[in-house]
Amino acid sequence: MIEDQEQNPDNNETEIADNAPESSVVSEEETAEPEDESLAPEKPRKKRFGWLIPLVLYSSFFLFILFTVLANLGGSSDVLKESIEQYLSENTNYTAHVGKLNAMHFFPEIAVDLENLELRDVKTGDVAIYIGKAQISIGFFDVTFKRQRFRSFSIQDMRAAAGSLLGKPLSFEYIGLRKEEEGAFLAAEGNLDGRPLSLKIAFNPQELADRGVYTPMADMQMILTLGEIVLEGVLKRDPKNDITLDGFKLRSGDQEVLTGTLALTRLGGDKISLKGRMDVLPHKTVLHPDLVLDLGHAPPLVQGQVKAGLFNTSDFLPAAPAIQIGDFLLRTLGPFDPALDIDLNLENFTVGEVDWGTVETKLTKEAQHLTIAPLSGEIMNGALSGKITLDSTQPLENLSIQIGVQGFDYAALQRQFDLEAEIEGRADIGINLKAEGENPDALLGALRGKISFIAGEGHIRTGALALWGAGLPGAVLPGMDNNTMLDLRCAVIDLDVENAIARTGTILADTAQATVQMSGQYDFQNDLLEMNVHSRINGDSVLKQPFAAHVKGAWGELGATKDTFGINMDAGAMAGDAAGPDFKFSGLPGLPLAADHPCRAHMIEAEILEAPPIESPPAESPAIIEGGP
């Protein structure tokens, strides 16, 4: 036994260790020096991330089951058909009825294929919108990740009654995405109120070929045609899905009517911002709108500002191309009668070929009441004030125009036609007109009221009169050549307007060299002036006896003929000093003359004091003309 132990000492030690208590056994790891942890072997990853593998397996299995269910969920059951009808009825103002549901799927594409869709008026039951066939398909993951890509989109035989979508009947043979030789397009072909209608918007043809989907591009060429009206430009999209119509051109036939760039931005809720630039042709008015359209307001509200680098009134007359197209579109697209709250800043305010200056005002409209007030700015270097209102609440529209200009520089007006014209002087102008009529043309023809012009000291060379008509200086001021300088002491034009025809109350120009009186009328609608002129040379002159002439024609094309017998003119009226004690005129209410004004001695003060008052303007606005016809 002892011998065996001596021969196998290791076995003996092992047996002792096995029989020893656990607390008495010290392992080598406990007695060894501690080692650097960075050198320790890495623990197995299956112990650290062992939970991930089951999660992936379970998730994959769940998604597999989900997609399998989605792929099999669908078809053409009555339940799905009723779901579509309920969804459309709840999200439109109509009662929906689907004639036939061919198929509906949810994965791998969200797709619907139906026929004979009717949207009926809730009250009458009449069909407002009908769609013969509709096929729409969008990838499931495209919807999930908000990618704007269509597998297919096609609507055929669509008809909309007047008042359902637009103000006039609308029909489409086809609306959809399709590939043509020149690329891929969202295309539409139809008819609007008897006029052929077509639309083409370019989509990305490369993605169409590579992936079998239609994808809108960042820049998409667009062309819309309605009869002879054509709108073309580039639709630009940004990440916020805001849209800019860049470099657009609107034309009627071969005539360009509107060009520019417009940006539409969603502001949240029912508000849309509209900014850009519009050039109105043919007179090249340049507008810079910065507006907000609030569709949630009742009625819709348009507010903001419009600036014009050039504003030519000829582009906004009833017969102007832009106004004609605008009226047509409003009648065709349906009623749109918004409230307005717009600040207007119009530079280079031009009438015809004449740049009158600048106009600043606010355009407001509530219900059928339009107000342009207060007017401010500079007209021929004179201070502008006034107010314009148009009330359409009654069967006949009521127009009121009250405008005043203090310090009107008529020399600046003359120099627009002749830079070398020697003329100097200023005047005060008052316009107080009213009208009633069924339309703008009727209003113009019904104008009535008063127009007054009062000028003080000034100078004018007789040759400047030739600008308004050939032979005018010689006929009106006989014996004076074109180089005679006239020193103006007082000039008054007092016109009574009735049915757009201004008849003279008083027209007198008193100078140191000559005195001129006129009587007659001016037809605003036909731009026709017809006046009898009576003049007398003042001072020591053999031509001191009165002369008479007849002037007729349009401004700038006046013709003058001498009439030595003084037709329709009392020669005795010129006897004595010019602007004598019998010469009287009513002043301009709201635009008082200075105490030292040379015309003030002849003004009828009582008429100023008795002028009927009108509504007072805001405190911060300039004084406007008071009184009325």
Image (cartoon, rainbow, N blue to C red):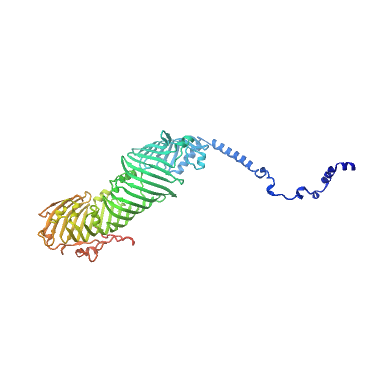
The answer, for residue 101, to whether it is visible in the render is no
Decide if residue 321 is on the left or right side of residue 534: right
- Residue lying furthest bottom: 595
Task: Give the image location of residue 352, x and y in percent.
Answer: 26, 50
Task: Give the image location of residue 495, x and y in percent.
Answer: 21, 56
Comparing 417 with 217, the one in front is 417
Task: Give the image location of residue 479, x and y in percent.
Answer: 12, 56
The answer, for residue 36, to whether it is visible in the render is yes
Decide if residue 405 is on the left or right side of residue 41: left
Q: Identify whether 192 is placed above or below 278.
A: above
Task: Give the image location of residue 375, x and y in percent.
Answer: 31, 57
Decide if residue 2 is on the left or right side of residue 386: right
Q: Identify whether 222 is placed above or below 438.
A: above
Quarter of the image with the N terminus is: top right
Decide if residue 206 is on the left or right side of residue 470: right
Quarter of the image with the C terminus is: bottom left
Comparing 275 with 521, the one in front is 275
Comparing 555 with 75, the one in front is 555
Q: Identify whether 522 is placed above or below 224.
A: below
Comparing 156 with 469, the one in front is 469
Give residue 386's quadrant in the image.
Answer: bottom left
